[in-house]
Every structure is written in C-alpha cells, then in structure tokens.
Amino acid sequence: MDRSDIVDTQYSWQRLFVALVIGLVANAGMWAVVVIMPAVEAEFALTRAEASMPYTLSMLGYGLGNFVIGRWVDRVGIATALMGASFGIAISLFAATLASDIGVLAAVHFILGLFAAVGFAPLMSDISHWFVKWRGTAMALVASANYLSGAVWPTALAGVLAQDGWRAAYLTLAVITVVVVFPLAMLLRRRVPEVAVGVMLEATLMQRNGGLSPVRLQIYLGCAGIACCVAMSMPQVHIVSYCVGLGYGPVAGAEMLSLMLFGGVLSRIAFGLLSDRLGGVRTLLFGSALQCLGLAFFLPYDGLVSLYMVSLIFGLSQGGIVPSYALIVREYMPAKEAGAQVGFVLMMTIWGMALGGWMSGWIYDVSGSYEMAFLNGIAWNLINIGLVLALFFHKPAQRPPIVVG
C-alpha cells in the first residue's frame, strides 16, 4: 500500500476537523469546574484550598484517563472509546448536580475527568497516525481543542450560571456532550491499516534518544511535564478566584480565563507550525521560557485592564508546551503504542496541573495572597527549563527523520 494514500490526505484533514469539534465538547467539563469554584466555595463554606479539590480530583482523573483510554484506543480504536466516554461524561455531570458536600463533588469530578480525557491525548495520538509532513501542526490543532473549550464554554454558560446556578450549567453540558460527541465518533471508525504503521527497532530508538531508553525518556519527560504544569496551573485554575479577591468579580475572571485560553489556542497553532521545522525538544524549550516570562508579568500588574492584557500574554506564551511533549514521544518512540505512550506523558503534565491547582490554593490560605503562589509557579517553571535544557544537550544534534505511523 502506498503510504501517500493514507497520510497527509484530504481525509486526514477532514478527520482532524471532526476531532477538533469532539475535543471542543468533550473537554468542557474540565473547564466548567474552574468557573464554578467561587460558587461552590460560597455554597459549602469552604477554604480556597478545599474549593480547589474538585478541580484537583478532576485533573487526577483526567491524567489517568489519558493513559488508560490511550491504551484502550491502541486496541479498539478511537471511535469506540469516544462513544463510551461520551455517556460517561454525561452521567458524571449529572451526578455532580446531586452532590451535597465537597467530598462527593470532588469524587464525582475524578470520574468526570477520567472520561473527559478521551478528548485530549487519545485524540492526539490517533491523529498522529494520519499525518507525517504536518504531524506537529495536526497534533497541536487537536490539542488546541482543549483550550478552545475553555475559551468558549465559560462565556457560553455564563448566562445559565448567573441565572440558574452551576447545577443547571452542568445539566446543559451533559445533554450537549451526548448529542454532539456520540454521532461524530461514528465518523472516526476508519483505522490506519497495519501496513502503514512503522515499527522502530530498540537499537534505533536508543540511537535516536541519545542513549536514553524509551522508558527512561518517558520518565524524564514526565518529570519535566509535572514541573511546567505546576507553573501553568496557577493562572489557569485561580484566575477567577483571584479576580473575586481583588474585587473585580467572577464574570471578569471568567472573561480573563477565556481570553487566556483563546491566546493558548493561537499559541498552539503557531507552535505546531514551528515544531514541524524545529522538532519537539527545541519547541518545548522555547515555549517553557516564554511561559516563565508570561507568569512573571502577573507579579507587578493587578489592575483590571492590565490583568486582561497579562492573561492574553500568558495564553500566547505557553499554549505550545503540552503538544510538544506529545510530538517528542511520536518522534522517538514506537508508533504502535502511541496511545499509551502519549497518554502517559500527558498524564504527568495533567497531574502537574492538579498538584499546582491545589498547591496554589494552599499557599493562598497560608499567606493570604497569591503573590507567593505566583513565585512558586515561577520556581517550578525554572526547574522545567533546566530539565529540558539537559534533554536538549543529551539528544543527538540533528533532528531524527520522521517514521510513518
């Protein structure tokens, strides 16, 4: 079979568009929990760290789901996983509306995150099989659906949230998920033929990885992912609560979150195009340095207008980081296990978000302000830069050729 008939074709781009729409809806619950945090804090009389627990548990489930569902996709294909997960998301959203205390709500969000993960790493690993020349761009576009979801749904549901409360907003998302994701999943039933999947030998992998085995490289990338996403989580998780504390209200915070994530969408597209030229490691290093700079801007600027600007700058600076990890995995590891491998590394980045979301709330409770939380994020970001620099100098100087699959 001619591989040119499979990858980088019109069908590949059509499949990418369907994946974008699915990701836009499947990831909605992940961001809704950020917007409802102030309402949940007030309803259950919680501390800021306690109010962060549904998000933290959601991210723990989301991270685990990227790995577990990713392995499932390697066996049964993305369509089956999407159809099952769409009902899991809807049931979890409905169950959340019945929660009477923060413990139950947090536990339900773990399940919600587990199923919502189908819209991230599993979709990215699937689309990676259908592109070679534009693989970095395609994976970044699918990853951008996560941020696009965060940019769209907080604003779209603002009216329901203000008028009918967070439970009504969750019920709305439950219905939309089943109506949209299930039928679109049927369009992704076609799978890459086995003949088109390139399998690399262990010796080749060792040479490409500059002496690092696939397992060691995965662990290394996982540690770097935790560090960068602890830093990334501070603005993304706490921007709404931060604005409430400054007296600007939750609506302004939701708008800043949407602006931040919209900037992240643009950033992921731009970094995806860049990664097709530079490769994953160089792109990751560049993005991590920009994120650290964007995070630092939150320290001197806390006025309403300046926070809007800084939120956009932060989104534009860091959007390309997470897709770079997935691209590195696909550049240096076997294609036949892409779902599990990409899922593991992205699981670690998401667990970094969970740790950082809780840690920032705890620092706020102890110090009474978010200044120390921002400084904590910057410190973790510097650790990430150090790890990526070590990987950059460890790997071969030339970019490895891309293998189809």
Image: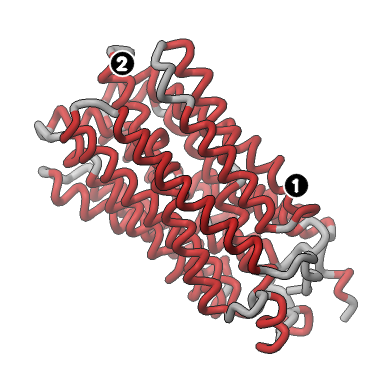
**Colouring method of the image:** secondary structure
Which element carries disc 1, helix, strand or loop? helix
Q: Marks 2 and 1: in contact by CB < 8 Å?
A: no
Report crowding for label 2: few under 14, some 14 to 19, many 20 or more residues within 10 A (C-alpha): some
Location of residue 342 with respect to 58 vertically, above or below: below
Image location of residue 325, percent across then percent down = 58, 59
The residue depicted at 42 percent of the width and 19 percent of the height is: 300
| Nearest to N terminus: mark 1 or mark 2 | 2
The disc at residue 249 is 2
Location of residue 388 with respect to 379 vertically, above or below: below
The reply to whether residue 126 is visible in this rendering is no
286 left or right, relative to 224: right
Image quarter of the N terminus: bottom right
User: In whole angstroms, how far apart are the C-alphas of marks 1 and 2?
Assistant: 37 Å
Which element carries disc 2, helix, strand or loop? helix
Number of marks in the rendered image: 2
Image location of residue 122, percent across then percent down = 54, 63
Amino acid type, callout 2: Gly
Amino acid type, callout 1: Leu
Residue 116 image-quadrant placement = bottom left
The residue depicted at 52 percent of the width and 79 percent of the height is: 215
Image location of residue 228, percent across then percent down = 47, 49
The residue depicted at 45 percent of the width and 47 percent of the height is: 177
Residue 377 image-quadrant placement = top left
The reply to whether residue 353 is visible in this rendering is yes
The residue depicted at 40 percent of the width and 60 percent of the height is: 63
The disc at residue 274 is 1
Q: Tell which of 368 and 172 is nearer to you.
A: 368
